[in-house]
Amino acid sequence: MSEGIKVLSAGPGVTLQDRGRPGWLNAGLSRGGAADPQALSEGAALLGHSDDLPALEMAGMGGAFVAQTDLRLALTGAPMQVTLDGERLAWNASHHWPAGARLSVGGTVSGGYGYLHVGGGFMGHAQLGACSAHLSAGIGRAVQAGDVLAVRRDLGGPVGLALPVDDRFNGGSVRIVESLQTHLFAQNERERFTTTTFRRDTRGNRMGLRLVPPEGGFHIDSGRTILSEVIVPGDIQITGDGTPFVLLCECQTTGGYPRIGTVLPCDLPIVAQAPAGAPLRFRFVELDEATAAERKAASARQTLVKRLRPLIRDPHTIPDLLSYQLISGVTAGDDDTGEKEDKDGTVN
């Protein structure tokens, strides 16, 4: 459809992203796609559609947008300050977006990448099998003021739903597996790497981010050089001065720095979403544990809809009350395990 969302303003890192372009490594193109793919699945669960559909990725800050037609929206990923016509909206939730209403998305409260989804998904221009902007490869461009983002036909569904999610927006513990060069690092260097609490540096983007160790850097045994070879998101390269860099979704496809390990894909969003200064620690796991973790994460994504809960709001302050699904939130009132409302309006 031609109608969609008018962009009044946009931060410098607002782009359209889906799950990216697998299968182009031999052509020198990394997969790209959303920096936090988990957020795509969460938005899809809230709106009841496929997680292959594009969403608007907002790095650090969002912008101001006006709906040109009645829409449903969902907000996932790093929590951001957001209002709809001046009324605060709950994050990790779905809402009705009336035509003409202004959605204002400010900076992140924690984490780095927030996501705006619409019912039916955005209608991006597909290139090489995906709609994702891959700026480092010259594919697509950032969203700018004055753009009109077309949306696909929405088959409809409820709004006013919340999705409780685990905190992955303040750093934490990350699982890694050995890489082809792990054995080149002395045992004491590997042990020091896993006992070190790193801080996420201010330098970083969708290609990768720098880790700051509290002490000296890390070096391979005997100072051997490495031939350039294929690298992938999650690889932890150690540069010449011993500094670790974690590669992310838009990383280059070959590199010659030694890799001390590789982050599990299911844990990579913890790294990608870590704000500057956030603590990060790494733990080696065996391949069977890594495989089990990936299967568990995939299963959890497929069952996200089972975690949906109704938002609790004051009916007197809801101008679009009739658009919300209310029946599923009704109880007899005599249950012993009453749900409590958080400050942001979500239910625990």
Image: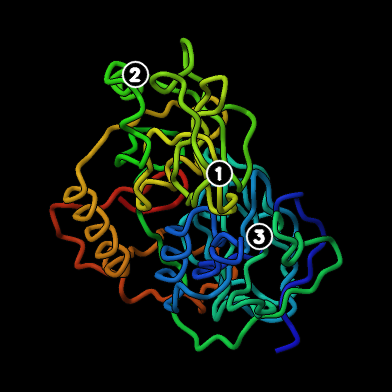
| Circle on res. 275 | none
In this rendered view, identify the residue nearer to me: 227 or 251. Answer: 227
Above or below for 169 versus 323 = above
Dot 1 amino acid type: Gly
Q: Is residue 347 left or right of residue 336?
A: right
**Which of marks 1 and 3 precedes in the sequence?**
3
Q: Is residue 33 left or right of residue 168?
A: right
In the picture of the structure, the residue carrying the numbered disc 3 is 84
**Which of marks 2 and 3 precedes in the sequence?**
3
Above or below for 226 versus 129 = above
For the residues labelled 3 and 2, the Cα–Cα distance comes to: 51 Å
Would you identify the image quadrant in which residue 167 lies?
top left
In the picture of the structure, the residue carrying the numbered disc 2 is 189
SS of the residue under disc 2: helix
For the residues labelled 2 and 1, the Cα–Cα distance comes to: 21 Å
Dot 2 amino acid type: Glu
Q: Residue at x 36, y 42 (%)?
A: 180
Would you identify the image quadrant in which residue 313 lies?
bottom left
In this rendered view, identify the residue nearer to me: 190 or 56. Answer: 190
Residue 67 placement (x, y as % from top left): 72, 73
In the picture of the structure, the residue carrying the numbered disc 1 is 255
